[in-house]
Image (cartoon, rainbow, N blue to C red):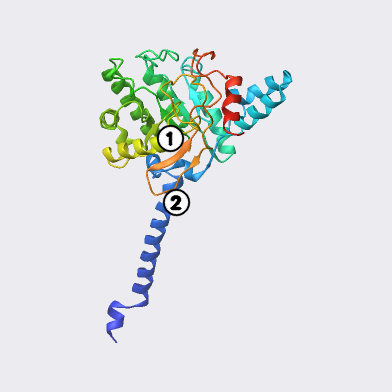
């Protein structure tokens, strides 16, 4: 006997409907799982990596290696302060002079593996653009124009699929106009952005600091290299501006860029800035680094430049990037360590 239920509500139809619902739910759950671990991954540029994991501490940093030297020399207090400094996460700088093509990928991969074992984020600073440090010259160098993309590409290949973060080319855009290198800097950094985005590496393009290039000009430079394709920008790298000044600068810059995120280097800004940027006297360590969740675009405060490393051969310092134990101690003591 035919009934309304037998035409449209039969057990077979109901079972089929349940199956379809379960399939749809499974598809949604499957997509959600794949979004974290499969081919449909969450865009790395949409993630604040610093909110997801701790900050990596490199046990073989220059500061860490300096502890043994201080101990061997019987400098107990220096060893203590260097050990305390070495226990705080700082950026790992990649330069073609130290990590050339053919070697940089293996080095970065090994560090990524160490960080993964610690469930931590390692911050790499890519610092090799042609005519690097064209204004001051203390860190002059970089790759050739022909080799830059290959070098960055090797870094991207090594970091792809990891949680590592890149801060791209400190000072490169801020110094571009004064050095007459705007066109080449835009060309090289645009290529670097493409390579890092394609590799899936969360990236912040360096944007100088609050006392250098006006926000409107910096925003134009950042747009020209494709900052809209990466996580955002970095400020105050290797400089001494206060947190407050950098927050104001970065907030204005983010507004001009339509909401970009940013990170701030606070490693040596405990006593603020002077007009001197190369190894200025009377400075202090800044507050410790860590992620930020304050409803703004600020992702983290970092120590991008290891505080104990020299700015260059000025005011008695060794070459840029080398550990200067005496100054490291001064910075730590001035901060009350």
Give x and y (percent) for residue 235.
39, 32
- Which residue is at a point 29% across and 21% down the rendered structure image? 187
Q: Label 2 neighbourhood size at 10 Å, few (<14), some (14-19), many (20+)?
A: few
Badge number at residue 33: 2
Q: Image height check: is 316 above or below 282?
A: above
Q: Image height check: is 126 above or below 119?
A: above
Report the residue marked by disc 1. 264
In depth, the one of 273 and 257 nearer the eye is 273
Q: Image height check: is 244 above or below 124?
A: below
- Earlier sequence position, callout 2 versus callout 1: 2
Q: Image height check: is 48 above or below 282?
A: below
- Which residue is at a point 38% across and 69% down the rendered structure image? 18
- Badge 2 marks a residue whose secondary structure is helix
Give x and y (percent) for residue 165.
45, 34
The CA distance from mark 2 to mark 1 is: 32 Å
Q: Given this view, does label 2 or label 1 mark the residue nearer the observer?
A: 1
Q: Quadrant of residue 58?
A: top right
């Amino acid at each position: 006997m035919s009934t309304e239920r037998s035409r449209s509500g039969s057990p077979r139809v109901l079972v089929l409907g349940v199956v379809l619902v379960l399939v749809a739910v499974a598809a949604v759950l499957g997509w959600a799982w794949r979004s974290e671990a499969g081919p449909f991954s969450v865009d790395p540029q949409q993630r604040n990596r610093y909110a997801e994991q701790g900050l990596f501490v490199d046990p073989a940093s220059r500061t860490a290696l300096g502890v043994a030297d201080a101990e061997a020399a019987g400098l107990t207090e220096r060893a203590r302060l260097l050990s305390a400094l070495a226990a705080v996460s700082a950026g790992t700088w990649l330069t073609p002079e130290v990590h050339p093509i053919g070697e940089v990928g293996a080095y970065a991969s090994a560090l990524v593996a160490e960080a993964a074992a610690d469930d931590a984020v390692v911050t790499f600073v890519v610092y090799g653009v042609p005519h690097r440090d064209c204004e001051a010259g203390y860190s002059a160098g970089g790759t050739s124009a022909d080799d830059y993309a290959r070098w960055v590409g090797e870094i991207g290949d090594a970091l792809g699929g990891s949680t590592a973060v890149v801060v791209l080319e400190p000072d490169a855009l801020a110094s571009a106009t004064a050095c007459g290198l705007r066109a080449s800097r835009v060309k090289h950094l645009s290529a670097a952005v493409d390579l890092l985005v394609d590799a899936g590496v969360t990236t912040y393009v360096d944007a100088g600091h609050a006392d250098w290039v006006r926000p409107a000009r910096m925003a134009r430079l950042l747009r020209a290299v494709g900052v809209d394709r990466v996580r955002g920008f970095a400020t105050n790298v290797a400089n001494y501006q206060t947190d407050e000044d950098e927050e104001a600068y970065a907030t204005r810059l983010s507004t001009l860029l339509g909401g970009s995120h940013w990170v701030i280097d606070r490693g040596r800004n405990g006593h603020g800035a002077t007009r001197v940027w190369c190894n200025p006297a009377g400075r202090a360590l800044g507050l410790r680094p860590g992620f930020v969740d304050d409803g703004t675009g600020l992702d983290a405060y970092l120590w991008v430049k290891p505080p104990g490393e020299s700015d260059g051969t000025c005011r008695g310092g060794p070459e840029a990037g080398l550990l200067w134990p005496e100054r490291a101690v001064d910075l730590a003591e001035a901060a009350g360590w």
